[in-house]
Amino acid sequence: MGTQKTRGAEILLEILRSEGTRYIFGNPGTTELPLIDALIVNPDFRYIWGLQEATVVSMADGYSQASGKPAFVNLHTSGGLGHGMGAIMNAKIARVPMVITAGQQDLRHILADPLLAADLVQIAAPAAKWCFEPNSLDDLPLILRRAFHSSVTPPRGPVFLSLPMNILDEVGSPRVLPPSRIELSSVGVGVKELAAGLLKFDRFRTVILAGNDIAELGLGKAAARVAQLLGAPVYGASWPSVNNYPSIDPFWRGSLPTTAKGISEILGRYDCLLALGGKSLISIVYTMRDPIPESIEFYHISEDANDLGYNDAPKLGIFGKVRATLEALADELELKVSSAAVKQNVEIAQKEKEAIWRTLMDQADAAVDDGDKIAPIVAAREVLRPLPDGFLLVDEALCANPFTQPMHRSSGGRQYFHNRGGGLGWGMPAAVGVSLARDHAPVLCLIGDGSAMYSPQALWSAVHENVPVIYVVFNNLEYGILKNFMVNQPQYNSNQHGFLAMDLCQPTVDFPSLAKSMGVEATVVSSYKEISGAVEAAIKAGKPHLIEIPVKGIGGR
C-alpha cells in the first residue's frame, strides 16, 4: 500500500480478499456500519445476511465445514456476540475454522459506558481459540493475518476479534503483510514401525476409527487403501461433524455409539485399533467403562499433537498430516500384502456390509404401518430413498439420526454433516452455508421439531440467498431424546408421573405457515408412501422447500 492512506474498513476487505474470502456472514448494527458502508462499493464480496446471530454463526459453520476454508463472520457488538455464543461453542467443539468479529463502540468514549459496550474479548474467550481487540489502525492488518492463521492451525477452531468503530473509520497507511503459505510437516515419523505393528494381526482383527477433526479432503481414499490391505472394518466418530469416509465403501460400519460402554463393546471385538484424528470417542451419558479396552493394541495418527496421549495411551502416536501418513502407510503395507489377499478382504467385507444393510431394511419393513404417524426409521428410509449417492445431507433430526447416518450413501469427501457441538439450532442455517460452499448445490436438511424452533430465521436466509435447501421436519410433538433418556433411568419420576416441559402440543407449531411467512413453500405428508415423491418434487423445483412429516414419539405415540 505504500504511503497511500486508506480507511480501516477498506484495509479489512483488502486482507479478506487476499485470504480468498468470498462471503461475509453477518447481522448488522450501528457498530458494524463502517464495514457495511465499505461493502456497498466492493461488490466482489457477498454479504450473507442472517436475522439472528446464532443463525449467522451456524451458516458460517456449515460453509466452513463444506468448503474446507475458514469463514468470516461479523456480529453486532455485545448483544450480537451474546446471541451467537452457543453457535460459537458448537464450532469450538467441532473444531470449525472461523474468524468471528464483532463491532465495538468507538474507543474514544468507551469509558462513558456507551450502549452495548462491553469487554467483548472476555465474553468470547471461553469459546474462542484466541481473542484480541486492536488499539490502533496499525494493529489491524497483523491481527487479521494472525486470526486466519490461528483458525486453521490444529486444533482448528473459531477465533474472535473485537473491531472498534473508530479504527474501521480511521484513515491511515499501516503496513499490510502479504498472505503466508504455511505447510504442516507431511508424513509423520514412525510409518515403518506402524506398518510392522499392524501386520502382526490377522485380517479383520484390526479396526480403523476414521474420526473427527480430519480436515484434509480426499482422506477416504487413503483410509480405504489401508482398510483393504488390513481387512479392517472402519467406524466413524461416536458423535461426528462430517463423514470422513465414504459410507458406500464395503468396509464402512457406521458411527460408534455415544456411551463409553457401547464404544468399548464394539472395539472389544478386535485386537488392534488404528485411530485417525482426535476427539472422536465422545460420550453423551456416563457409563462406568473406558471406551478403549485394555486388551486392544492402540495406534493413533493426528494432525494435533495434543490429541496423542490426551485421554489414552497409544502404543505409537504419530504426529503429521493424516492423509499423507496413511498414503505412506499403504505403500509400506503393499510391500507385504498380496493383491489376492486384498481381493479376498474386499469380498468378505462386502458380504458383511450387505448383511448389515438387509437387517436395517428388515427393521424398517417391520415398522411400516398405515397410521397417522410414521416410525422414524421408515421416515428416514423414504426421505433418503430418492437421493443419488453423495447428495448433501445436513442432519439434526435426533429421533431419526440412528437411521439416517447408516442409510445415507456418501461417495467420498464431505457429504454428510452433523451437529457435533450439540447446541440445538445449528442444522437449518448450516444447510444454507453448505449450499453456498458447493455453488448453490441442493441440500437436504433433516431437522426435529424442537431443533427447528431454535433458528427458523434460516428459512428467510435460504430464500434471500436463493439456495435450494429442502427442510424436512420430523415432527413428534416432543423433545423425544430427553424423554428417551428419562424412561431409561428407572429411578426417575417420569416413569410413573410423566414428563415436564417436553411436549410441544399446547399449542402445536404450524410449520407450513411458519415457512410460508418467510417465503418458503411447504408440504405436509400424511402417509409414508408420499414422502419420497414429496422429496423428489422439492429437489426438482430447485428452491427452498419445507416438508413436515408426523413421526411417532416415545412409546409409539
Image (spheres, rainbow, N blue to C red):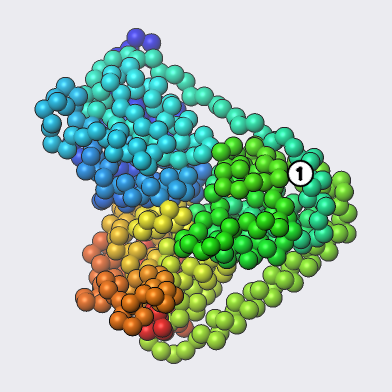
Answer above or below: position of 479 versus 57: below
Left or right of residue 389, residue 207 in this image: right
Judge from the rendering whether residue 351 lies leftward or rightward of residue 508; answer left or right: right
Q: Residue at x 61, y 48 (%)?
A: 312
Residue furthest to the bottom? 370
Q: Position of residue 151 (x, y in %)?
A: 46, 36
- For badge 1, the amino acid type reads Leu
Q: Is residue 317 above or below residue 246?
A: above
Place of residue 86 in the rendered image (x, y in percent of width and height, measured from the top left): 33, 50
Q: Is residue 64 left or right of residue 329?
A: left
Quadrant housing the C terminus: bottom left
41 vs 496, nearest the viewer: 496
Q: Residues within 10 Å of mark 1 (few under 14, many from 20)?
A: many
Q: Quadrant of residue 33?
A: top left
Mark 1, residue position = 194
| Nearer-the-camera pick, 423 or 28 | 423
Whether residue 438 is visible to the viewer of this picture, yes or no, is: yes
The location of residue 10, given as percent across then percent down, is: 31, 25
Q: Secondary structure at mark 1?
A: helix
Which is nearer the eye, 495 or 61?
Answer: 495
Residue 542 at least partly seen: no
**Which residue is depicted at the point 43% across and 50% down?**
62
Which residue is rendered at x = 87% and y = 48% of the image?
336
